[in-house]
Image: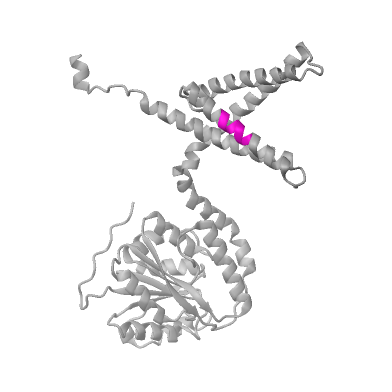
Amino acid sequence: MRGIPAPRSAVGSSRPRVSVVIPARNEAAFIRPCIASVRRVLLGVGIRPEIIVVDDGSTDGTAAAVRHCPADWGVRLVRRTKAGGKGAAVLDGFSRATGELVAFIDADLELPAADLLPMIERAEDDPNLTCVVAARARDSRRLGERVSSTVARRLIRAVLRLGVSDTQAGLKLFPGWFAREVLPRTVRERGWLFDIEMLLLAKEHRLRLAEVPVEVRAVRPRSAGAGAMLRAVPALLRYAARRWRPLWAKSAVRRSLPRALRFLAVGLTNTAVDLLTFLGLLALRPPGRDVLLAAAYAVVAWGIASLSGYLLHSKVTFRARLPVVGFYLVTGTAVGLQALCTVIGTGSAMPHGPLLGKAVGMGLSGLVSFLGYGALARRRAQRQPRPLKLSPAATDEA
């Protein structure tokens, strides 16, 4: 269930109140310019921000730099005596934020504070339902950082299909109620992938995900992060399972899988019946060089196998009595398709052409049979009269 959205503020301006959380660990050189930049950008468009700096166990002068900010800046400092990771710092700040919109931004401003403005504009139409993600479109960092970042983004995008091109940029904006009431209670990831869990939760709460292209600046050297990426693989697999499990449960493929397995089992059974019948006839009276007798044996074996297939597909696979004429029309089409593929493969110049053509034909004929028999079963089910359901009162009267 989604939390109850916080009402829009009506104090002083029609624009939403914005809280900006800045996670910081040993950021003494960057933290004050970051705070000043966020204030300048937002005040310039009439938004007085709530700025929350979360000091995640810094051992330098980060906390002192925040304390020395002018009092009228209204900066709130949250000190964590032990480092818990960037995710933990962001969530700690989110739990204390009061804004209608809540963002977090990296202290080094590799993504400039000015990028907050288009993100806020995207969210203003419906601040209770829109999450906005910064998507790194231009990147001036070192080659190693760009390559590792691109690989990670593409891998995550392919595995999770969240609808955004960049899940890891250090600038995101959420509805206040979601950032304050949902994320701190439900996000478990504290390391590199905490952003992904946030966006997964947004999807699960049916929030819209929008993205704004931004430019990444090279502020300081960073490692390529290959080790961190490898360590994050198990968590990424868990998130992929979490993302796809409900989609798989609702998919047509998932609903058809038990029937497809029954179809395969019946097909193998029919093949065994065909082969055993043919071998039995050969043992009963060997045809020698009598081509017509051998062909008759093949037709009889196929006929018995097809009858077995009709009964088993009706009773086991589709659990509906298939019309005989329709069944043999579909079966004949499948057999003809298999023969056509075999002929094409035999006439080609490819090595092992007949075998390849036969294999392709078997696959296509199986698919045609499965879909055709399924269509016949659905038509038969639709034509059957539904039992009349009587109400309790009508039952008593009867």
For the point 52% across and 63% down, which residue is it? 193
For the point 34% across and 71% down, which residue is it? 122
Name which quarter of the figure residue 73 lies in. bottom left
Residue 28 is situated, as x and y percent measured from the top left of the image, at 49, 84
For the point 40% across and 85% down, which residue is it? 37
Query: Is residue 242 within the magenta segment?
Result: no
Nearer the observer, 90 or 133: 133
Magenta-highlighted stretch: main secondary structure?
helix
Q: Which residues are magenta?
A: 332-338
Q: In the image, is residue 312 above or below residue 69?
A: above
Apparent side of residue 51 relative to residue 296 in the rendered image (left or right): left
How many labels, in total?
0
Q: Is residue 370 visible?
A: yes
Apparent side of residue 121 relative to residue 165 in the rendered image (left or right): left
Apparent side of residue 128 relative to residue 190 in the rendered image (left or right): left
Residue 287 is situated, as x and y percent measured from the top left of the image, at 78, 16
Name which quarter of the figure residue 397 lies in. top left
Name which quarter of the figure residue 278 lies in. top right
Residue at the far top: name it: 284
Q: In the image, is residue 86 above or below residue 255?
A: below
Q: Tell me which colouring the rendered structure shows.
A: one colour
Nearer the observer, 309 or 3: 309
Nearer the observer, 383 or 156: 383
For the point 77% across and 46% down, which residue is it? 351
Quadrant of image for the C terminus: top left
Residue 158 is situated, as x and y percent measured from the top left of the image, at 54, 59
Q: Is residue 258 visible?
A: no
Residue 309 is situated, as x and y percent measured from the top left of the image, at 57, 23
Nearer the observer, 299 or 168: 299
